[in-house]
Image (tube, grey):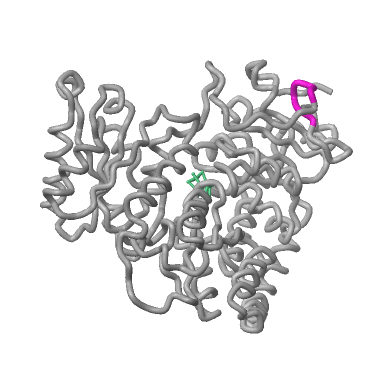
Amino acid sequence: MQFKCNQTLPERAIHIALKGPDGKCQRGDGTGCFIANNVATTPGDMTERGCTYAGCRGVVGGPVKDAIQLTHGPIGCAFFSWGYRPHLADSDFHMKYTFVSDMNETNIVFGGEKKLLQSIIEASAEFPDAKAVFVYNTCSTALIGDDGRDVAKQAEAIIGKPVVFFECEGFRGVSQSMGHHVGNETIFRQLVGSIEPEGDFSRSINIIGDYNIKNDIRTFEYLFEALGLQIIARFTGNVSVDDLKIMHKAALNIVHCQRSATYIADMMKEKYGTPSINVTLWGIRNMAQALRAAAAFFGLETRAEEVIAHEVTRIQPYIDAYRQRLHGKRVFIYQGGPRVWHWIELLRELGMETETAATTFGHTDDYEKIFNQIPEGALVIDNPNVPEIEEILNRRRPDLFISGNKERYLAYKLGVPFVNGHTYDTGPYAGFVGMVNFARDIDKALHAPVWNILHQRARPAPATHHAAHGF
Ligand code: CFN
């Protein structure tokens, strides 16, 4: 069988797949092979992907709360990476300020190393409380061959604090995913293990791959603490430079986002022998499972059951009420990567089924986890562009679209209820209590009075669920 979006390039067929009746993957070009992913975007395809700099500056490095976040490049690279992602902390220095070497045409011709050195010295003098300077390379400064690593070394000797240089020039790799990798490796190499603190760390953990989007940590950190565990570092939501330096002391790494941060857990395993467990901190079953797995490692199983029972009792009445209102709804989830598979179970707990799934930069392991969980007949699409998303919304008519702000108004224009899964409409959405917020936002989106008005107007009746599988 061949199926594809009509409004797209023929090369895109290998990025589209259905879960066939036998549970196997059927690809859009009819070969039956697995969905193509993590490869260069087809020329001519207006991708929504970000660049390597975005993944490094925006996702991994940017949340570090007491580092000067300095872009070595043109001002636009700094401006457009500033403040779009609510990776909050208990202070707001990292959200409030962004720094840039402000490369202009003359600097591009004659080189920007001096200007970079000057920028680091100036920024550090202006903000003496900052604990480090994070310098992010961009396309322009990489192309002209500025030696940022060397400048960082010189600057470090002058200012007397770490200057961490990220080789995250935008053109490396095929998406922001490469930027995550660069961010992990650089922080590991330059900061982790640079202090050897005294103390008992036998019951300590790091939370790896949470970025404290809209205060997600408030929904789960107290649960790990209730088990009696001490959190040393978060990678990288609400984290300080000093926390990163001692994160190698943790007895266990708890890895939540398994796309952007597994790298550092693996490097810690190799160098320090730190064990790690993969968890999902969204949804009732997953959150309980995460606590059980952490507790099992430390022999705290009984305590874990008490904590879980207490929390679930608290939220269950709300979940039951929302479930009645959300039951049977068909969802299209499009996120950067792992959130898609993290949420399939959560949506089922609310009575909903994921019938279309897409990621911007997911890898094979993400798609495998998606395929294992979605029902037969579900559609999966890698790195979709706007015409494809529009076609999916029109032809498959999901009851709900969970996506990001880039797609919000497209969804509204096409009359599809929308929830923002990247930066959250309200949030936080993680943990047990966050799930109630998520359910409330979904309920609000689905039952907004505006749909009654729209549905009364002449609009082509949505095709039935099965007939809508036109792909
Ligand atoms: S917070 Fe994370 S959970 S870090 Fe990553 S892969 Fe992005 S910013 Mo948007 S919401 Fe998204 Fe994931 Fe990990 Fe966020 S699915 S695209 S790069 N992501």
| Direction from residue 276 to residue 53 in the image, left or right | left
Q: Position of residue 10 (x, y in %)?
A: 67, 16
Query: Exactly how many numbered labels are in the figure?
Result: 0
What's the magenta region?
26-31
Q: In this view of the protein, can residue 454 be seen by the observer?
A: no
Tell me the quadrant of the picture where the C terminus can be found: top right
Q: Residue furthest right?
A: 22
Residue at 49% x, 41% y: name it: 405
Could you say which quadrant of the image residue 93 lies in?
bottom left
Could you say which quadrant of the image residue 198 lies in?
bottom left
369 drawn magenta: no
Closer to us: 447 or 365: 365
Tell me the quadrant of the picture where the N terminus can be found: top right
Residue at 73% x, 23% y: name it: 4
Residue at 30% x, 27% y: name it: 142
Give the answer, above or below, for where 460 lies relative to 8: below
| Direction from residue 94 to residue 180 in the image, left or right | right
Q: Position of residue 200 (x, y in %)?
A: 41, 79
Could you say which quadrant of the image residue 398 lies in?
top right
Residue at 54% x, 37% y: name it: 407
Give the answer, above or below, for where 240 lies relative to 85: below
Closer to us: 178 or 66: 178
| Direction from residue 282 to residue 19 in the image, left or right | right
Q: Position of residue 27 (x, y in %)?
A: 76, 27
Prevalent SS, magenta region: loop
27 drawn magenta: yes
Q: Position of residue 159 (x, y in %)?
A: 13, 51
